[in-house]
Amino acid sequence: MLSAYVDSLLTGYSSRKRSGMPAYLPTRFIDTPAGSVRLFDSATAKPCVVLVPDGPNVIEHYGRLIELLTPYLRVVCFDMPGFGHSLPSPSYRHSLDQGAAAVLGVLDALHIKSAVLAFSCANGFYALRAAQMAPDRISSLVLSQTPSLNAMHGWVERIIPWPLKTPVVGQIAAWLFRKKAAKSWYRIALPKTTPVQPFQDKALDALADGACFCLAGVVQGLCREREELLSRVATPLTVVWGGKDRSHKLTDPHSLCERIPHAEVVQFHDCGHFPDVEQPERYAALLLERIARTDKPTICDGS
């Protein structure tokens, strides 16, 4: 609990620099059980998809994907607590239940009865848990670069430096080196042929404006969870996997199928860690196709 308080304290301090994000993508804040969440909502009465960036990506990284989807869907995009400008509460430990509660809290606040969740990497585990907790509200899942929880634990052991896995020490280190970590992460996560500067610039602009990047918190939170908790998910599930993600070169793209046999894996062989924003046109087409094939329609109130 002390580590969560430290995260809340440090992110609150950073947020005092906030001057406001670009007006071309209007956002607002809502309260959830996990903290204050910043979100974009197209607020149209159409089938609904919820997008969540994988930090250090923020909502602004999703501008092109949002543009492609809004003619057909109600698009909600929000940063999870502890990332972007969504501040975590002092008790938010990035557990599966807390993350799922944050997701369902967004749906409640926006009066969304049912939605497709299109999440990425570690956030995919919160989407899976939300589908377990409220199966009637999550019509399908499209998860990018989300392996099994055991495979993610193995990834953490290989990739994440030991200080970040240590409570309190990790929170302080992640905050002190958040800009350096963001810059270096894109060089590992993206294919060598993909320019990293556009990704870095958006992330560093957000961090300079007081955004969060609580990497230690989410690593520690998910490492406390057991694989068995995510075994019984009946919701239709597609896993999108970027084949040129060097950080995941030892991760089995099909590992989630071991616990959720009906999961379908679609590989974007030319993408790295962020297939949803590296190839937004291709990803949007896939997402629209998956929504069209879902037996249970997605329903949104008019907000």
Image (spheres, rainbow, N blue to C red):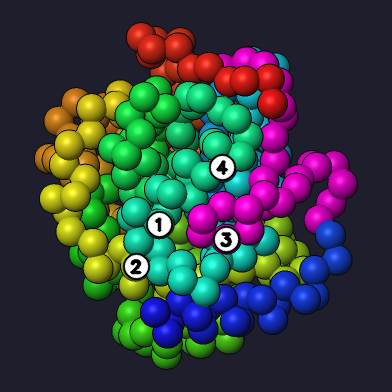
Q: Quadrant of residue 27?
A: top right
On the rendered structure, is 303 left or right of 282? Answer: right
Give the amino acid type for the residue marked by disc 4 in the picture.
Val
Q: Nearer the viewer, mark 3 or mark 2?
A: 3
What's the CA distance linking mark 2 and mark 4?
Answer: 21 Å
Check the picture and name the quadrant holding the C terminus.
Answer: top right
On the image, the x and y values in percent for residue 276 come to: 52, 38
**Residue 81 image offset from top left, x and y in percent:** 54, 60
Q: Residue under circle 1?
A: 98
Q: Secondary structure at mark 2?
A: helix
Q: Residue 217: within the magenta?
A: no
- Dividing the picture into quadrants, the one containing residue 140 is top left
Drawn side of residue 85 relative to residue 157, left or right = right
Q: Which residue is mark 2?
A: 221
Identify the mark nearer the N-term, 1 or 4: 1
In-image side of 34 versus 28 (left or right)? left
> Would residue 36 be counted in the magenta stretch?
yes
Helix, strand, or loop for circle 4?
A: helix
Q: Residue at x 77, y 76 (%)?
A: 16
Dots 3 and 2: beta carbons under 8 Å?
no
Q: Earlier in the sequence, mark 2 or mark 4?
A: 4
Q: Callout 2, which amino acid?
A: Gly
Residue 91 sits above or below residue 268 on the image = below
Of labels 1 and 2, the one closer to you = 1
Q: Give the residue at mark 3.
A: 35
CB within 8 Å, label 1 to label 2 = yes
Specify start and end residues of the magenta stretch as a single range. Answer: 21-47
- Disc 3/disc 2 C-alpha distance (Å): 16 Å
- Circle on res. 106: 4
